[in-house]
Image (cartoon, rainbow, N blue to C red):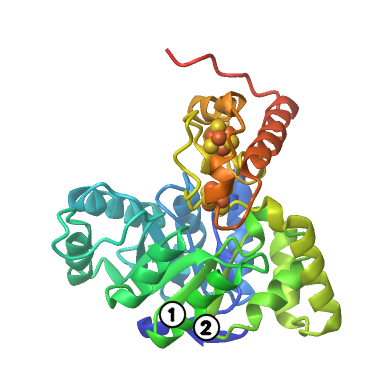
């Protein structure tokens, strides 16, 4: 497996790394062999989150006997420093370890800094002093937040959506991270499940020497596909370039990054959630996507008055008002197919 140094962490990790969001959909018994196979095949970096239901616990069950041979990156989204330390204890217990390699501030809307009043960065430092985390990271869906973190000197890693669907603006983050020796983890490397040409997705990101894609894996056959690609990497050339162009043409207008720039919506629609609800219904566990909270959010899409303010603000030029309708349709169809009962209106 090709390996690189993850920025200033100095950690050596495999370029093919394991994104443990979709594995939430599998049972513990199904997930354990998948993690074991990943490890036995040479994958050394496993990325999870406190917010991914039982994903941490599955990694703990499967990989705690080989803890010293792997790199675990997890995430939490606390409101303050005390909450961060509590969440970290839960992560450590779930992961069956006494440290995580990188603790990332999850889905950051801002960049926590020392003395900003939140106490979050100070809690990260305290956890590091106590040896409970080795490095400090941040994950963001908004480019300015990711850029600020990368340039701040405060973060060892940044995680951001990067794939063949990324704009040139997004791809600038790659050089910024390189210049600042910040490890760069690519989330949504297959566009949240949209991209079908996996060799093209793989070859596209492999061209950037400092990017570590986190391939979201739910099934053994998906893992085997990435292992096969790693063993025999597709070469960048006319065929792959044509596949990338094709995927971009077909999917570019459908991929919501969840950045939230389209808000606020006068109809109070949570656009980033609704615009990804169909994809979420295929990637997340039912306890999350079918929750009454999600159902109420998706149902709210019916209130859209087509003012198109959202589309005018979307930096990716998505037809947001159409995307929420399309995604909501997929979402309700999934619920129907899975015979999931519909939630009543909130009180
Ligand atoms: S077009 Fe619909 S979703 Fe977009 S801002 Fe207007 S009401 Fe909200
Ligand atoms: S619709 Fe556009 S602006 Fe809104 S969350 Fe998605 S990518 Fe961001």
**Left or right of residue 51, residue 30 in this image:** right
As displayed, is residue 335 above or below residue 261? above
Dividing the image into four quarters, tell me where ligand 1 lies: top right
Q: Residues within 10 Å of mark 2 (few under 14, many from 20)?
A: many
Depth check: give the residue in front, 310 or 234.
310
Instruction: For residue 289, say whether it is visible.
Output: no
The structure residue drawn at horizontal position 42% and vertical position 61%, both measured from the top left corner, is 139
The structure residue drawn at horizontal position 42% and vertical position 12%, both measured from the top left corner, is 347
Marks 1 and 2, the one that precedes in the sequence: 1
Q: CA distance from mark 1 to mark 2?
A: 8 Å
**Left or right of residue 292, residue 203 in this image:** right
Q: Residues within 10 Å of mark 1 (few under 14, many from 20)?
A: many
Q: Secondary structure at mark 2?
A: loop
Is the shortest distance between ligand 2 and the CB of mark 1 under 8 Å? no
Depth check: give the residue in front, 342 or 33.
342
Q: Position of residue 128 (x, y in %)?
A: 22, 69
Residue under label 1: 177
As displayed, is residue 204 above or below residue 107? below
Residue under label 2: 210
Q: Secondary structure at mark 1?
A: helix
Instruction: For residue 333, say whether it is visible.
Output: yes
The structure residue drawn at horizontal position 14% and vertical position 54%, both measured from the top left corner, is 117
Determine whether label 1 and label 2 are within 8 Å by CB: yes
């Amino acid at each position: 497996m090709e390996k690189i140094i993850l920025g200033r962490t100095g950690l050596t990790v495999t370029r093919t790394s394991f994104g443990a969001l979709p594995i939430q959909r599998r049972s513990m018994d199904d997930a354990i062999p998948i993690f074991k196979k990943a490890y036995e095949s040479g994958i050394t970096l496993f990325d999870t989150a406190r917010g991914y239901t039982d994903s941490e616990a599955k990694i703990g069950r499967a990989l705690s006997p080989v803890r010293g041979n792997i790199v675990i990156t997890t995430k939490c989204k606390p409101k303050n420093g005390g909450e961060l330390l509590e969440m970290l204890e839960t992560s450590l217990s779930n992961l069956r370890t006494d440290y995580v390699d990188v603790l990332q501030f999850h889905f950051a809307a801002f960049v926590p800094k020392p003395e900003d009043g939140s106490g979050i960065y100070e809690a990260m430092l305290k956890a590091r002093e106590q040896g409970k985390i080795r490095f400090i990271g941040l994950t963001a869906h908004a480019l300015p937040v990711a850029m600020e973190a990368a340039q701040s000197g405060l973060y060892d890693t940044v995680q951001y959506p990067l794939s063949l669907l990324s704009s040139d603006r997004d791809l600038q983050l790659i050089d910024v991270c390189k210049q600042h020796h910040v490890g760069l983890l690519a989330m949504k490397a297959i566009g949240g499940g949209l991209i079908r040409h996996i060799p093209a997705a793989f070859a596209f990101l492999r061209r950037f020497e400092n990017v570590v894609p986190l391939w979201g894996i739910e099934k053994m056959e998906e893992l085997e596909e990435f292992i096969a690609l790693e063993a025999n990497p597709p070469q960048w050339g006319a065929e792959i370039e044509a596949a990338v162009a094709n995927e971009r043409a077909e999917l570019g207008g459908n991929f919501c990054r969840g950045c939230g720039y389209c808000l606020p919506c006068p109809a109070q629609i949570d656009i980033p959630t609704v615009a990804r609800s169909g994809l979420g219904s295929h990637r997340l566990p039912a306890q999350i996507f079918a929750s009454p909270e999600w159902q109420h959010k998706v149902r709210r899409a019916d209130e859209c008055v087509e003012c198109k303010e959202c589309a005018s603000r979307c930096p990716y030029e998505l037809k947001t008002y159409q995307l929420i309708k399309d995604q909501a349709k997929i979402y309700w169809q999934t619920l129907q197919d899975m015979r999931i009962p519909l939630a009543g209106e909130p009180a």
